[in-house]
Amino acid sequence: MSTILTAARHELLASVRAKAPYALVAAFLGMVAASTFIGWRTSVTVTSIYDQVLADGLTTQPNPFTDVSPLYYVRNTVIYVLLIGSLMAATLGVQSALRDRKAETAALIGTRPVDGRALRAGRLLGLGLLLAALVGITQIITWISVSALVGGPLSASETLAIAGFGVITWLLLIGFAGIGVLSGRLLRRERTALLAPVVAWAVIAFVIPQLGTAARPVSLLNPVPLPAQDSGAFSWLSQVLSPLAITEHFKTASAALLESSSTGSPLASALIVALFACLALAAAVLIRADRTTGGTHE
Amino acid sequence: MTTAAISIRSLTHRYGPTTALDGLTLHIPEGEIFGLLGHNGAGKTTTVSILTTLLKATSGTASVAGHDVREASHQVRRSIGYLPENVSFYDDLTTMENLTFFARLSGLRRPEARIGEVLEFVGFTGHDRERVGTFSKGMRQRVGLAQALIHQPAVLFLDEPTSGLDPEGVKALRELILRVNADWGTTIFMNTHLLSEVTKTCTSIGILRSGRLVHHGTLADTVGAFPTDDALERAYFAAGTTTS
């Protein structure tokens, strides 16, 4: 246990001190903060157009934003988690795995009486805590900004929904961090190690959903998940590949939490995202690189 | 009868078709400062890598502090300290943070007091809050030695410890090595290709040539065989051709 805690503490400290992923972290936090404002501006713009159309007598329909939940303003965050958060998490994972190699401390660690799996688990724990802190900050930013826009604090159920969205976000990010750790550990060059999780991300976020939905790539940048095709080869493909469309499942679970329109089963989708995180973490703990020596921990 | 701190029998290691170590047999008693001499590529670092459990030998056996390096690697790691040739740390972290990490990995739960003690021993107080990335080679070497000593190992492995140091640094490190041995009774296994260092530091020496031990004896015996100013140099070049 002490090895796990030591490694976790070290991971947190070293990640915070390493300045390389700061740009991605700043972009992630900044866009999450901006997404509430974007949602609010959308609402204001549509309402002003609606008022004009209503004044001109061109519609008798109610304003689509009249009864919208305050959580509607958060829905764009889903896309920023997918686009920036996932890449940030994968980069942090790669940096974590490469740290000993870059610092040339592998030999020192290799002569210490520690279990390699405990060391790797501890580092993932540290990475998980770091991501939890970042996600926590985004949730606090979200809660404060939405409360400010609607003119009062969010209700308990809305606060819980934001917290739930934070949990599902963390599960997705730790999964991508695990992929980053594996890539950093198994691939020899830093550039390749950084590129591999990006390719994995592109396949998960774009290629697999496209094969199942026949959607245009730009449609996949919508926070609402796309319905699967119900006929032909795409229907068959969607059934086969559906469990692998992790980001679409993330959208489904998030949409349910944020009271957006959703297809599919949110609970099943949340479980698939959790399974993705568990598998990535298990692989990152259990798979060790053994390219050069027999006795080292890495 | 003295106990062997390091015991090696018929140790062989191959990297593909290349034989780096060829049937090395060696016994080093407790409390010795042993210098392993050899040219570049003689097998010195391979020997240390096997003894420090970083590398598994192709064949043969070795034990350190009474523990087999293959069967009881955890116990060996508890008993050893290691200073690699180019010691590196996490440059973004301070001396204290780096040493705390390695001390905890070595099993020390509250290492702060011990870190202070070891830093004082290696003459490096006052730098514990500075980032290691700002240190010179000599300063890193002191932090490296502190790291290797922090858990009071029975056996200390030093791989080319004075490599790249200026004369003051070499002298200071030499004095530290002698003090570690004298004050704490630590057995020291030192790889080097500097004959002068062996003369000034070691109590016994071994000479490796192309993976084979061609000479092993006390420093006094080795130098005594060549009673000249350059006795060790003569012994080194004669080893493998006239003596073994």
Image: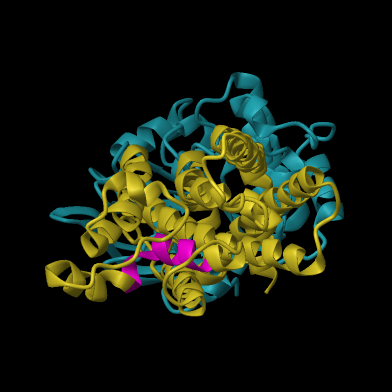
Where residue A88 appears, x then y in whole percent? 51, 45
Which of the pair A111/B134 is nearer the observer?
Answer: B134
Which of the pair A276/A50 is nearer the observer?
Answer: A50
> Is A287 displayed left or right of A149 in the figure?
left
State which region is magenta.
A243-253
Quadrant in which residue A49 is drawn: top right
Where residue A214 appears, x then y in whole percent? 22, 57
| Chain corresponding to yellow in the figure | A
Quadrant in which residue A69 is drawn: bottom right
**Taking B187 as reference, is A266 above or below it?**
below
Q: Residue at x 16, y 56 (%)?
A: B16
Where residue B215 appears, x then y in whole percent? 35, 50
> Is A228 displayed left or right of B152 in the figure?
left
Q: Is residue B217 visible?
A: yes
| Chain corresponding to cyan in the figure | B
**Taking B97 as reference, is B79 above or below it?**
below
> Is B110 displayed left or right of A2 in the figure?
right
Quadrant of the drawing holding the N terminus of chain B: bottom right
Q: Residue at x 25, y 76 (%)?
A: A239
Where residue B31 appears, x then y in whole percent? 64, 59
- Magenta run includes residue B227: no
Which of the pair B128/A149 is nearer the observer?
Answer: A149
